[in-house]
Image (cartoon, rainbow, N blue to C red):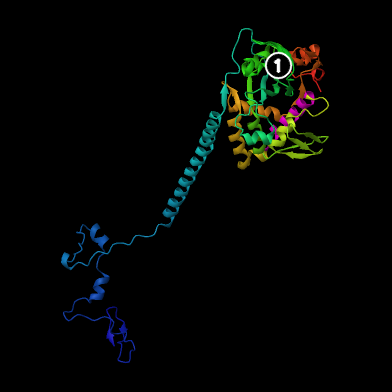
Amino acid sequence: MVDAPDGRNRRRRGASGDEDRTAVFRRPADGGMPEEIEKLYRPSRSEQRSAGGARPTRRMPPAEDAPPRRRRPRTYDGGGRKRREREARRRRRRTILVLALVVLLVVPTVFYLWADSRLQRIEALPDYEGRPEDQPGTTYMIVGSDSREGLTDEDMQDLRTGDAEGKRTDTIMVLYVPDSGKPSIISVPRDSYVTIPGIGDNKINAAFSETLGGGPSTLVQTFEQASGVRVDHYVEIGFSGFVDIVDAVGGVEMCPEEPMEDPKAGLDIEAGCQEFDGSTALGYVRTRASARADLDRIQRQREFFSALISKATSPGTLINPFRSVPLVTEGTETFTVDEGDHLSDLGGMALAMRDSPATTAIPVGSTPTLGVGSVVLWDETRSEEMFSAMQAGEEIPESAMQE
């Protein structure tokens, strides 16, 4: 047993490992305070500072003996990487959006300008003294000519077109779009007896004949002076272009009530609904092998032209590149328009013809035979009623329409 500073006895730890609590503290040989007790009474650093004592300094080992400083490893910034990835995705999406807008805006514009440049243009609507002033509504003159341009000898033989030089009107129609109301497709009989500037009284077909000194501008002027209706746009297409356009849309369905056969036009069809390809369609709109000859023919022309435009502007054609691209390519190359007309005017014509237009003809009064042959004289009362409505931009009344 030994006496502890607090007066209690402590045991020593023996060899057996038992703790001898009397030997916890050892008294130094010089009789001073044991080191363990001295530590308990040593003032803290904060007490030393408050007492005015100097802050103990830490002795640093010599530089050569200092251990090398370990660099703190960089930690993985998962959140920052995700932010960078999100920002990169946003940039890619913005780039794709800009490219898509460029494609949607630039490509159609370039395609439109290219297609518009392919249209053949002539001066068909020149001003002249006495020409009707601008009128409400919009009027298109649509001419199907018998021009063989673009056809080979084999084509002319297959299509039964003959090999006549020059060109004459095979079809004359006027598409009239009033300011309000239903549009009308009006056939102009080719044998209409009118006064032609520079030629005299003759069939209106002669106004287009190049051999008589006519042409598109003479035809337009003749119709304007005979009707008092101003023509706003001019569209012409020949045999070759007609066949190509019908084939480009994949054919047109027609439903003739009777079978028709005409070796001169290369036509041989059965009654009932059937698909007409280009060559069959050309024979169908040209034949006169029916009871009323030319009057039946112009009725078939109106019906077929309406069906063709409806097929050409249908969603099945427009969204199908194998149909729409050949249609634009063939159509723009074969259409002849006035110098002031553009592809947008053809589009307006097509849209008007999809709006279920009425089909009619200039009312016929009689068909006498005169010095130039069998001609068509217009019904003065009913034709005047028709032309007055067109001059005023109004819908043509049914009483003025010809069957």
Helix, strand or loop for the magenta stretch, by majority: helix
Q: What residue is disc 1 on? A: 204
Instruction: Give x and y (percent) for residue 313.
Output: 67, 34
Q: Which residues make up the magenta segment?
A: 294-314
Instruction: Give x and y (percent) for residue 319.
Output: 63, 40
Query: In front: 149, or 246?
Result: 149
Residue shown at the point (75%, 12%) measured from the top left: 371
Would residue 223 be counted in the magenta stretch? no
Eyeballing the image, is 209 above or below 107?
A: above
Quarter placement of the N terminus: bottom left
Residue shown at the point (76%, 25%) measured from the top left: 298
For badge 1, the amino acid type reads Ile
Q: Is residue 28 left or right of residue 88?
A: left
Would residue 309 be counted in the magenta stretch? yes
Q: Is residue 356 visible?
A: no
Q: Badge 1: how crowded within 10 Å, few (<14), some, or many (20+)?
A: many
Quarter placement of the C terminus: top right
Quadrant of the image occupied by residue 17: bottom left
Instruction: Give x and y (percent) for residue 44.
Output: 26, 64
Query: In front: 125, or 64?
Result: 125
